[in-house]
Amino acid sequence: MPITPVSTEPAQAAGARTRLSDNYDTFLVLLTSQLQNQDPLAPMDSTQFTQQLVQFSQVEQQIRTNEQLEGLVSHYQAASAGSALSYLGRDAIIESNQTYLANGQANWAYRLPQSAESITVKVRDAAGRTVFSTTAAPRTAGEHLFAWDGTTSSGGTAPDGVYSISVEALNESETAITPTITVRETIMGVDFSGAEPVVITPSGTRGLDKIRSVLDNG
């Protein structure tokens, strides 16, 4: 008889074990009936039901592995939640190109893995429109700060809100250099509504995997 496949999702391990138990009981009933009614002159080949028993054993091992993974996931989620709560009210360095302009001030940092021959930094608003662009930015290897006071390329003043930057850099061979961009923001809250907790900052929500360091505001 066919064995019900086991889902690889740890959360379904308990249901899978129940289905396996039902399948195993049905298998034993059918096997017992076949053995009782077999032709004595042509006995059943034991190879087939031996293979079935091996399959049941393998499926049971998979379910046990999934149950152990489920426990590990629960511990990880609890640890993540505890870590996120400990960040409340503190500033963090977050890998992101997005931050909040407030009172004429928005700051980013970008790290170049090597020196660039040319560089262009563009600031975009929440709709993706370029509002400011400059080529007067540091090009040497290492980390550099980029501060924007909200002045647009047309000479106007951008309203407070969420803005992002892109850093387009080329080396001497005119090959693109990929920088790492970070921002410093205050962690204002924690959202537990998803599968994993995320922190809330002035420019939105951030996954814990994007937090590079948490600072002591004292």
Image (tube, rainbow, N blue to C red):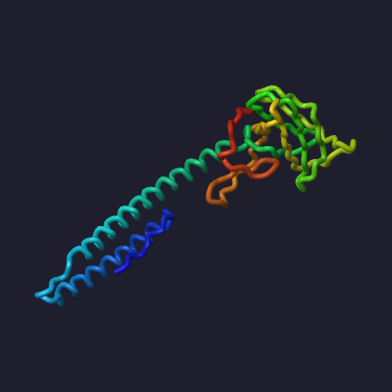
How many numbered discs? 0
Viewer-proximal residue, 140 or 175?
Answer: 175
Viewer-side residue, 18 vs 53: 53
Left or right? Give the position of 175 relative to 193: right
| Towards the viewer: 33 or 169 | 169
Where, by quadrant of the figure, is residue 177 drawn?
A: top right
In the figure, is residue 150 to the left or right of 43? right
140 shown above or below 50: above
Q: Residue furthest right?
A: 155
Q: Residue at x 70, y 22 (%)?
A: 140
Tell me residue 135's x, y (percent): 79, 29
Q: Judge left or right: residue 104 versus residue 87.
A: right
Q: Residue furthest left?
A: 41
Residue 172: quarter of image: top right
Residue at x-position 34% and y-position 63%: 18
Q: Is residue 77 above or below residue 63?
A: above
Point out the image quarter for the C terminus. top right
| Residue in the foreground of this view, choosing between 179 and 87 | 179
The location of residue 44, given as percent across then percent down, is 16, 70
Residue drawn at x 73%, y 32% is: 107
**Apparent side of residue 198 relative to residue 58 in the rendered image (left or right):** right
The image quadrant that residue 56 belongs to is bottom left
Residue positioned 76% across, 26% down in the render: 137
Quarter of the image that includes the N terminus: bottom left
Instruction: Indicate whether 34 appears above or below 216.
Output: below
Residue 53, image x, y percentages: 24, 61
Q: Does residue 216 lie above or below 39 as drawn?
A: above
Q: Position of residue 207 (x, y in %)?
A: 59, 42
